[in-house]
């Protein structure tokens, strides 16, 4: 296999970047912000958010606009 299609650090095949999703659910944890779920379905994202049992989650669109948050 050509080295052009192998990542230098892990020996894995190169994969094209995935298409950006419309909505991201983030968790504001002690180590910083982490993306925990991504989807193109707003209703599904809101249901996912409502199913969390701890505060600190945010729903943002692809531009970074805050749409919803799960507070204590």
Image (tube, helix red, strand yellow):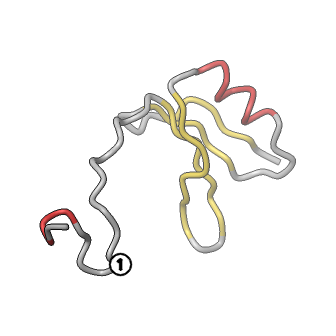
Q: Residue at position x 66%, y 18% from top?
A: 43
Q: Is residue 12 above or below residue 35?
A: below
Packing grade of label 1 (10 A; few <14, some 14-19, many >=20) is few
Instruction: Give the residue at the far bottom of this rendering.
Output: 9
Give the left or right position of residue 16, taking residue 30 as reference.
left
Element on which disc 1 rests? loop
Q: Quadrant of the N terminus?
A: bottom left
In the rendered image, residue 58, in percent from the top left (x then y), is placed at 61, 43
Q: Quadrant of residue 31?
A: bottom right
Q: Is residue 3 above or below residue 14?
A: below
Give the left or right position of residue 22, taking residue 26 as reference.
left
In the rendered image, residue 69, in percent from the top left (x then y), is placed at 66, 38
Relative depth, front residue between 1 and 21: 1
Give the left or right position of residue 21, taking residue 9 as reference.
right
In the rendered image, residue 50, in percent from the top left (x then y), is placed at 79, 33
Q: Residue at position x 54%, y 52% from top?
A: 35
In the rendered image, residue 42, in percent from the top left (x then y), is placed at 58, 21
Give the left or right position of residue 22, taking residue 53 as reference.
left
- Where does label 1 land, which residue? 10
Relative depth, front residue between 44 and 68: 44
Q: Residue at position x 55%, y 68% from top?
A: 32
Q: How many marks?
A: 1
């Amino acid at each position: 296999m050509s080295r052009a299609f192998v990542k230098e650090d892990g020996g894995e095949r190169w994969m094209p970047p995935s298409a950006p999703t419309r909505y991201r659910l983030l968790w504001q944890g002690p180590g910083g912000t982490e993306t925990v779920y991504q989807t193109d379905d707003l209703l599904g994202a809101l249901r996912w958010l409502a199913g969390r049992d701890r505060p600190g989650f945010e729903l943002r669109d692809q531009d970074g606009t805050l749409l919803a948050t799960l507070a204590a």
